[in-house]
Amino acid sequence: MSENTRRTFIKTASAFGVPALLKGASVTNAIKVGIVGCGGRGTGATAQAIKADDGAELVSMADITIERIDESLGSLEKFLKPEVRTRLKVEKAKKFTGLDGYEKLVNSGVDVVLLATPPGFRPLHLRAAVEAKKHLFVEKPVSTDAPGVRHVLESVKMAKEKNLNLVAGFCWRYANHIVETFDKIQNGAIGNIVNYYGTYYTTPVKPMPPASERPAGMSDMEWQVRNWYNFSWLCGDSLVEQAVHTVDKVAWAFNDQPPISCVAVGGRQIPAEGGNIYDHFEVNYLYPNNARATVANRQIVGCYNENADYIQGTKGTAIIGRGPNPRIEGETSWSYEGQKYDMYQREHDVLFASIRKGTVINNGERLATSTMLAIMGRMAAYTGQQITWEQAMNSQERLIPEKMDWNMKWEVPATPRPGITKFV
């Protein structure tokens, strides 16, 4: 930290009463950050976290292998500005590997924990961080099954009781141009919503490699974790892991109130050896007053791509993602014309500002319910049945192994077949 930056920081910190003593956790001038999950998203979140506050320092990292940790740290050292790079302070003893690395990290003296592992692990990691009284940034989705969502909701309640900050990685909620659009919708600019159509058409995130590429002797657990996006217990499927951003905007439009029920279609058009996820879904949610919301996603190479939202009301239509700015057409005409925040950076700016001020922000409930909304759609597609919100929330289907070991054998179920796969 340069001398000028240091003086500015001390002045700002004094205004906020730093060192701050929160009921849940204390921080000093240096806010110590730890990251669990050092892939691309975790590395990006780490960069944004230490840029969010002049006193934020990266001191701990956890992932399945030391190679992944060192790759992430190398990327940060390469791309961060020199004045930020000086706050990378990860000693060898604070690089934690293996499936239990998260436990060591949350007890390593950090103030803030960033969770960016495959989402199947997230309920377990979240609980450990809350019990250790750490502030949190939690990537979406927060679970891959209903038991995990219920576990998360308990953890969110615990976080509130401990006055811990918890910011969710539903980044569109931190994009000012989208926030302004939804404010206008919720203030009646398009009247009552009658239909929401959201698309998330893209290419595969991480295609499944052929079995021939699996190294001899590699365990089921390691092979699946290394290819996590292709297994529903780890990623939740494409609807839950990626198109959940669109599902979250649907939830936002309906004031985060749950739907009555949903029906869905989905399947696997392009074969993939070894994995068990779908490459396309279309879910139709029924809300009170016969309002409908449809979320369609596809992850297939060579197809039409689009990430857009068409929100129809009794007085007009809001359109997001078709054109450079959101707009409203109808009785009220409007288009966003201002500057746009970097929504990924904004998430962390808000989190660290709240910690400095000694206030609390907690996005945990909507993080859990939006995740559950996507899981509900997956349930309907997998089974071919109409699923109610109450059924989804009370589902007993557990995708995650009760106990996990790096060398364990773990056979995943076959790709679901509607009409044959049963709701649990």
Image (cartoon, helix red, strand yellow):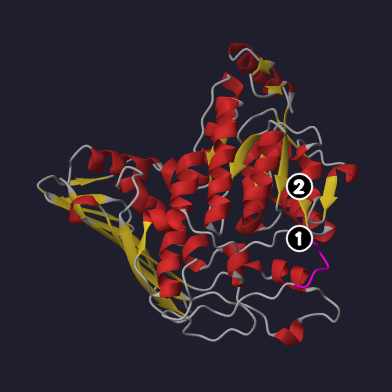
Quarter of image, res 303:
bottom left
Is residue 137 positioned above or below 299 on the image? above
Amino acid at circle 1 = Met
Quadrant (top left/top right/bottom left/bottom right) for the N terminus: top right
* Disc 1: which residue: 404
Amino acid at circle 2 = Tyr
- CA neighbours of label 2 inside 10 A, class few (<14), some (14 to 19), many (20+): many
**Which structural element holds mark 1?**
loop
**Which structural element holds mark 2?**
helix
Seen from the viewer's position, the closer of residues 145 and 236 is: 145
* Disc 2: which residue: 102
Residue at 80% in and 69% down? 408
Magenta stretch, main secondary structure, is loop
Residue 2 x/y as whole percent: 73, 26
Residue at 63% in and 30% down? 53
Quarter of image, res 128:
top right
For the magenta stretch, what is the residue range?
Answer: 403-409
Residue at the farthest left position = 331
Is residue 112 positioned above or below 315 on the image? above
Seen from the viewer's position, the closer of residues 287 and 357 is: 287
Seen from the viewer's position, the closer of residues 310 and 327 is: 310
Q: Earlier in the sequence, mark 2 or mark 1?
A: 2
Q: Nearer the viewer, mark 2 or mark 1?
A: 1
Seen from the viewer's position, the closer of residues 49 and 271 is: 271
State yes or no: discs 2 and 1 in contact (Cβ < 8 Å). Answer: no
